[in-house]
Image: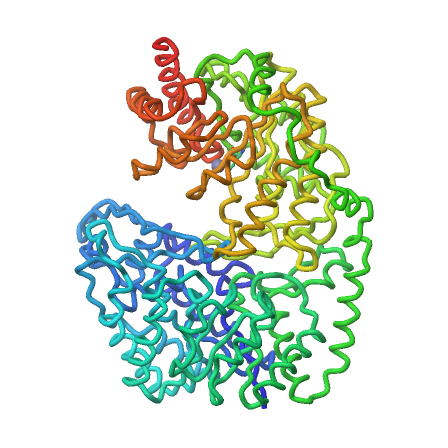
Amino acid sequence: MVLSSVLGFPRIGAKRELKKATESYWAGKSSVEDLLKVGKELRAHNWKLQKDAGVDLIASNDFSYYDQILDASLLFNVIPERYQKYSLPQIDTLFAMGRGLQRPATDSTPAVDVPALEMVKWFDSNYHYVRPTFSHSTTFKLNGQKPVDEYLEAKELGIETRPVLIGPVSYLVLGKADKDSLDLEPISLLEKLLPVYAEVLQKLLDAGAKSIQIDEPVLVLDLDEKVKAAFKTAYSVLAEKVPAAKLILATYFGDVRPNLDAVKGLPVAGVHFDFVRVPEQLDAAVEALSAEQILSVGIIDGRNIWKADLNKAVKFVESAIAKVGKERVIVATSSSLLHTPVDLENETKLDAEIKDWFAFATQKLSEVVIVTKAVNGEDVKAELEANAKSISARASSSITNDAAVQKRVAELGEKDTKRASAFAARLEAQKSLNLPLFPTTTIGSFPQTKEIRVQRQKLNKGEITAEQYEKFIEKEIQDAIKFQEEVGLDVYVHGEPERNDMVQYFGEQLKGFAFTQNGWVQSYGSRYVRPPIIVGDVSRPSPMTVKESKYAQSVSPKPMKGMLTGPVTILRWSFPRNDVSQKVQAQQLAFALRDEVNDLEAAGVTVIQVDEPAIREGLPLREGEERSAYVQWAPESFRIATSGVKDSTQIHSHFCYSDLDPAHIKALDADVVSIEFSKKDDSNYIQNFSDYPNHIGLGLFDIHSPRVPPQSEFEKRIADILAVYPKENLWINPDCGLKTRQWDECRKQLTNMVNAAKVFREKY
Ligand code: GLN
Ligand code: ZN
């Protein structure tokens, strides 16, 4: 009989219980016992939910109070000395490593002041993990036994689970050397780490675990020979030490084919593949397995919110069965369901037509089970028919088939992707802006004060009228402009007081988007996001930002930047469609934004910034066709959005959150780019953009911090940059928008920044 399995379930709770419990604990408002109790309840709830849904192989140890990779670091004692030294309770060490800890001394405890470990994106998802950080003094040893405890906890509830661990190779490869041990290559620690893994596996076996899921997602990355060889070492050692452990090696988020030689012949019981992402890898996967090994068929998408096409999924699993036989197949989610919202049932405001197209984590459990039942010959005819109906309803809906939008994309030509003139001519035309040398500006947002949030809530609750709200926003804009006058900036912004979020604000005004009330997904720690969902062909029914920009421009004669979020960023920070390529979705968004850019220009806005902070994170994980295609279509969609303007209109773009590839930035052909820069401690980074042909501003202060750098510090930074960049090209600006700051903080920060710019203006 074919078994069903789920690689992991969201741990945040359908009502964000985990966030509330952890934040209340951090704030000192509840005890550690309260927190642990909530954790236990969530685990029990999730296991029971899966059991009731009929899932055979349910994950345990997929729960975490912060991050599952950080849990592994704690388990293996990979705790840098700067955290060890405080001898905090285990859970506080976990949080200190995850988010830093600053605490004054008390009678019984010394003061604590330690920053967080580095946090990085989990593959190409919007989840972030805490990076394991190794040094020469790292001593692996078992620190507690969380996976065993949670396995037993489930067992006590009468639920047999399959514990999940991050695999040893991925664990090391995803980590890095600590500051004091930069010559250390994490993978060289493998042999020291393995005995501890063996110990955990043995304990799990002793506790009764029948099989163990061991995640090796790095198998979808470009790996060097050393890392590839490490798989053989790792799994031979584990098989030798714990021969009875039945390991299912799990890969996800991509194509394993380029690394199949590393998987072939490993002494594991089975291998899991993500066939949602890469159905084409079935034959190669089958080929790589021995006649005894299990093929775990990841066929229900763990990364998206769409109902699966169950009939298609059944066919796919049947084709796998035809190749390896029933006894060797497991039906599974493509990855952990961590990346999907918890339960669609909590959505009461979604349009019924659209709601019928969705499956959140809870609904995906049934999907896995239905497919399993179908291939086992059980009667699920009614379920499959209902599914087929909603799949075809979606395919033929007018929401997913807007002929005008499709026509516009189909007719996309070179003229839509290129400014009328090259940069030199544009620069000449933009002299009409009358900007001084070293123009100063900000990135867009000004403090989102409590008052702004209160007014927005009042509007949403109907406690004030749209006119009252509009008047309030106008007043905010006036204040922001007055502030900028006082500080002495050159190019103004309106401050974005009307925006709840840089993606949601646009999504709400575009046709083709849907929003959830409770569709939260963990981004990191207690930070969750609620991404908009692209449900259909995207278009712009009416202008989105013109009213505010026009108003702002009417208040002051200074150039006022119109402010938009770019097509790639809107796409990346939403749940995309799975029936249309990302490229086409970006193009649709780009045309909608092009209309907005052109309308802004027509309204007299002469400088327009289109932010693309997410452009780097969309880059496919490995080299090859998909990546080459992305570096074409992503900048192209930006150019579609921005190339419809006159030479004299100055196009800006802005990037943050990542190490950018200068080549990608160049391809946007923006007149001016601003890049987050102030926190880079690598002095070579300054060189990175030095051959950027157009104008550029490297962020001069950290907008996440209230710290006010003295004017001398700004001068030093500017001087360093001027040593590398031509003075005519340089803009003076912060790292990013100032929405999280207080007004008095940014007044001081910007005053020092502007004064420093003036010093250099005098000099040259
Ligand atoms: N214009 C946006 C702001 O200033 C940019 C935000 C971002 O890049 N994350 O808030
Ligand atoms: Zn930014």
Residue 476 visible (yes or no):
no
Q: Nearer the viewer, residue 377 or 729?
A: 729
Residue 724 as seen in the image, left or right of residue 545: left
| Position of residue 409 measured from the top left corner of the image (x, y, whole percent) | 74, 44
The image shows residue 117, relative to residue 686, as above or below, that is below
The image shows residue 102, relative to residue 725, as above or below, that is below
| Position of residue 168 measured from the top left corner of the image (x, y, whole percent) | 33, 70
Residue 385 as seen in the image, left or right of residue 449: right
Kindly indicate the quadrant of the structure image that contains residue 459: top right
Q: Which quadrant, please, contains the C terminus? A: top left
Q: Nearer the viewer, residue 253 or 604?
A: 253
Q: Which quadrant, please, contains the N terminus? A: bottom right
Kindly indicate the quadrant of the structure image that contains residue 237: bottom left
Q: How is the image coloured?
A: rainbow
Residue 75 as seen in the image, left or right of residue 647: left
The image shows residue 588, relative to residue 720, as above or below, that is below
Residue at position x 70%, y 59% in the image: 579
Residue at position x 26%, y 46% in the image: 103
| Position of residue 133 measured from the top left corner of the image (x, y, whole percent) | 28, 57
Kindly indicate the quadrant of the structure image that contains residue 704: top left
Q: How many marks?
A: 0
Residue at position x 52%, y 58% in the image: 16
Residue at position x 21%, y 54% in the image: 183
Residue 156 visible (yes or no):
yes
